Amino acid sequence: MPDPRQRLLDAAIDHLAAHGLSDLSLRQLAAALGTSHRMLIYHFGSKEGLLVEAIRAVERRQRDAFAEVSVENAASPGDVLRRMWQRFADPALAPHERLFFEVYGQALQGRPHAVPLLDGIVESWLEPAVEYARRHGVPEDVARADARLGVAVMRGLLLDLLATGDREGVDAALERFVEAYETVR
């Protein structure tokens, strides 16, 4: 059984993913979670601290999902990209991805509560991809640049999918990226 802090964090993530941030006060969030605002302050320090922890947890879950993408039997790096896209574009993840982009946008605007989210927001995704490329003989500098490009493309396409709902168009764009990537290889 998770500790009380983890239970609150999980419940907050689910609530925020379902309802967004908008003008939600800490008291309103606490009431929705069946706890007190003081309990949230005790565990997270502030509403802002809770938001950053929630997004970090969502990011960890996404990286765990990335780790579950089977790369060992992939026919090509493009096959790995397709598998990743299939996993990340799963409609069940959309509420959490919307939450990520909502707080990410606040961090980019310099809102103090969200700025800590930017620490490692790209770098934490690079190493698994760089390691995969290294094992396939790609030089370190190229592997790192390719990994960064892959993160940017996946995030951009996810944002496009969330904003437009055009699954067919976004899938086609991913396929064009894969084809271009494999042509360079």
Image: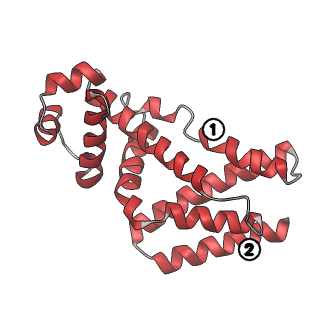
* Residue 51: quadrant of the picture: top left
Residue closest to the eye, 62 or 116:
62
Q: Residue 179 shows which numbered tag? A: 2
Q: In this rendering, would 128 be left or right of 44? A: right
Instruction: Please provide percent x and percent y for residue 49.
Output: 33, 27
Instruction: Please provide percent x and percent y for residue 105.
Output: 41, 45
Q: Amino acid at mark 1?
A: Glu
* Residue 24: quadrant of the picture: top left
Q: Residue at x 54, y 39 (%)?
A: 121
Instruction: Please provide percent x and percent y for residue 8.
Output: 25, 34
Q: Quadrant of the N terminus?
A: top left
SS for callout 1: helix
Which residue is identified by label 1? 123
Q: Residue at x 70, y 59 (%)?
A: 71
Q: In this rendering, would 10 be left or right of 76? A: left
Residue closest to the eye, 98 or 88:
88
Q: Amino acid at mark 2?
A: Glu
* Residue 10: quadrant of the picture: top left
Q: In this rendering, would 164 be left or right of 72? A: left
Instruction: Please provide percent x and percent y for residue 96.
Output: 37, 52
Q: Residue 168 shows which numbered tag? A: none
